[in-house]
Structures are given as C-alpha cells and as structure tokens.
Image (tube, grey):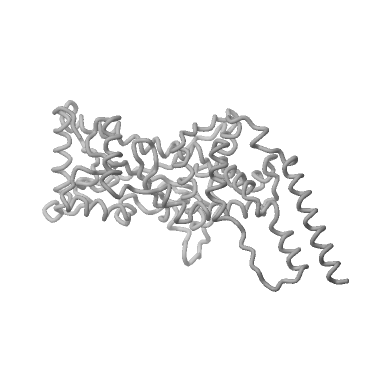
Amino acid sequence: MDDLMNVLAIRNLENAELQYRRNVLRNPGNAFIELSERQFIKIFRLSKDLCRFLIQLLEPYMRPQRRETDLDVQSRVTFFSLIVYLLSNIKFQILAALKFYGSGCYQPDVALNKYIDMCQASVSHSIDEVTNALNHPEIFDQWVEFPNNFEKLNRIREQFFRIHRFPGVIGCVDCTHVAIVPPNIEDPEYPEHIYVNRKHYHSINVQLICDANLKILHVNAKYPGSTNDAYIWSRSNVLPFLRDLHAAGHTDYFLLGDSGYPLRTWLLIPFQNVEPNTIESSYNERHKHTRVKIECCNGVLKARFRCLLKHRVLHYKPRKACEIINACVVLHNICIEYNVPLPPEDPDEGKGIEVDFGIINDIIEDQDLHVARSINPELADGQRARITVARSFQRPNQL
C-alpha cells in the first residue's frame, strides 16, 4: 500500500511539473516570441540568438547537482518542489540576471518583469548562479584574455596602427570606479573606510585594458576605491609579462595610459607641460586620440550594463560586487565579438541624474613619485622610448 502511495505521489508531482512548464510558456510572456529584436536587446542587452548561445554556454556550469542518496520519496518530492522550474530553469535564470545587469534595478523590480515573473529570492539565486558561471575559469579565461603570443600581439598592434597610425600599441589601460554599498565598518576582511574613493563614495577601483575594437583584454576588480591606479597596475599580472617581453628585446609593444601611471618603455603616458607646435604636443595629440579607446570602452561597458553606473550602486559585499563586474566584462566581450548594438536609450530613464562613468584621474609626475631619475633606470628608459616614438611621427608611418 505504501509503495502504491509513493508511486501516485511521484506521478502527481510529475503531472504538476508538466502543467507548471506549460504555464511558464504561456504566462509569463515568452520574450523570445513576443519581443522584437530591438525590444529584446533593450531589456536583456543581448540579441535573441546570442542569448540562446549564452544559455548553451552556461548550462553545464549552472545545472543543479542532484545527489543520489537514500532520501525517501517525500524528501525527493520536497527537493524537486524547491528547485523546479524557476530555480533550475536555466533560461529564466539567465534572463533574470541579464535584466539585472542591464538595468541595475533592485531585485524586486527584476522579479516583476513580465518575462521573468520570479519571486525576489529566485531572482537573487539566479543572479548568483549566472554570476558564478560567468566567473568560472573555463568561461572567463575564454572571453577575457590578454594576448600571450606574437600572433595575437601583432594582430592588436596592427588594429591600432590601422585606425590611429600610432605604432607599437597593444592596448590602452585605465581604471574606473564602480559604486557599492558601504561594507560593515568593523568587517575584518573588507573594512568600510578603504572603499571610500577621492570623490567620497564607496567603490571598487577596476583596472581595464582594451584593444582597438573595445574588447577588454584584462580586468582587475579586486581593489577598493581608495587604491590609486598606479598601485593596482604595480600588482597586475600583465606587468611582469610586458617587463619580460621588453627585457627580451621586444620593445616595440606597449600600452598607452594617462598620467596616473608611471612612464615605462612598456607603458607610455603623455608629456606634461608641453609647448604648442612641438614634437611633444604632436605626440600628446596622437596619444590622446588613441587612448580614447579605453574611455569609449568604459562608456560602452557601463551603458550596456547599467548596474555598473555610479547612481545604480551594487548592493552587494565587495567580493560579490567584483564577481558581478567580471560577469559584465565577459558579456561585454561577447557583445563586441558578435557586434550587438548598444540598447536604445529610454528617454524617461535617468531624468535629472548626471551620469558618472567613474573616472577619477590621478597624476604622477615624471619624477615617478619623487624617486630621483638617477636611481630609476626604468623611468629613464621610458623617457627615451617616448621621445623616440614622438619623433617617429615626423617620419613616414610604420609599424
């Protein structure tokens, strides 16, 4: 008798799940069918085909692990009732996360979207699941990669030269601030005061390096807002790679940065206090028009994924905020790779709000934090490399 009751319970559950799946297809609305391509991109930031691609890409990293244990039937019924079809449905989890990344709305607002229709707890779970999947090394390293061989380096260098006629550039570097809610004052791991930046709000200071197509080659979202750009760069794993590259004699590969970075042969910054109509002023003008790529990249990243804008503020602890930033960078690169247009602006959105893209400029004098030039050969080498590049602009352009 007990066995019969167990069989009936399982069958009833299966019927309920089937009916629930049918209801989901009808209500909430099916975004892939009901929305135009433009409307879909506006809400979810990706095209329909690219969203389907993302579902396939992330599914192996999001599927719930169903442990085969000695749970009785009632336990299995409870287990299934907790995870199907909102929490374990990959499509709805991804749509919920994309809506959050794109709009920066609070979780309850995401939950009310007619194409998601989840409870707030389910939205929270979905954002966490999708963020974790996008941060998985097999996903993240596939889509965010600094060039590590000459074929890739030369391809990027040629892109910059073709567009800007600036020889040797393999990327532009800068930092941008992403606002977060204040951590607990007495948090032993993330003390509140270290996240206050020079504009007096709490943030993560995020280092980005991009190529000429605005693809992000490197992201470092680990440092609090009080950390200056040069310090983050000094701890970057890109720095030793470039230093070794130059030590091996390959000095015609370098990044462009602003005056917040130390001048080196592998990182060229503008001249300071230049006179007009000079070699230095011509170099600065070319440098400015080339380095603008990183500013455009930051603008596109935050325009597409508005949860990163200052006035949105990520309501997460620093570690999870860093993971959300990384997730948005992966999605940004996917959009760049597949030429997804920026979503149309909502004329009613952000009225009366000054959009702040989180740029806080630091300045480092050529004395390199007041270290004497005579004992800083890397700075002296950087100065020679910079003037050599500046003089090359007076000659026929060459890689």
Name the residue nearer the viewer: 246 or 305: 246
Count up the numbered dots. 0
Residue sitting at 65 percent across and 37 percent down? Answer: 31
Quarter occupied by residue 73:
bottom right
Looking at the image, residue 132 sits to the left or right of residue 365; the answer is right
Q: Is residue 285 visible?
A: no
Residue sitting at 70 percent across and 50 percent down? Answer: 119
Looking at the image, residue 83 sits to the left or right of residue 199; the answer is right
Above or below residue 352? Residue 79 is: below
Quarter occupied by residue 82:
bottom right
- Residue 105 in the image, given as x and y percentages of width and height: 60, 43
Q: Is residue 4 visible?
A: yes
Above or below residue 342? Residue 76 is: below
Residue sitting at 55 percent across and 32 percent down? Answer: 352
- Residue 275 in the image, given as x and y percentages of width and height: 18, 30
Considering every residue shown, the one lying at the far right of the view is 1
Name the residue nearer the viewer: 106 or 8: 8
Considering every residue shown, the one lying at the far left of the view is 374
Q: Quadrant of the C terminus?
A: top left
Q: Quadrant of the N terminus?
A: bottom right
Considering every residue shown, the one lying at the far top of the view is 277
Looking at the image, residue 191 sits to the left or right of residue 258; the answer is right
- Residue 245 in the image, given as x and y percentages of width and height: 21, 51
- Residue 163 in the image, given as x and y percentages of width and height: 30, 30
Quarter occupied by residue 361:
top left
Looking at the image, residue 210 sits to the left or right of residue 262; the answer is right
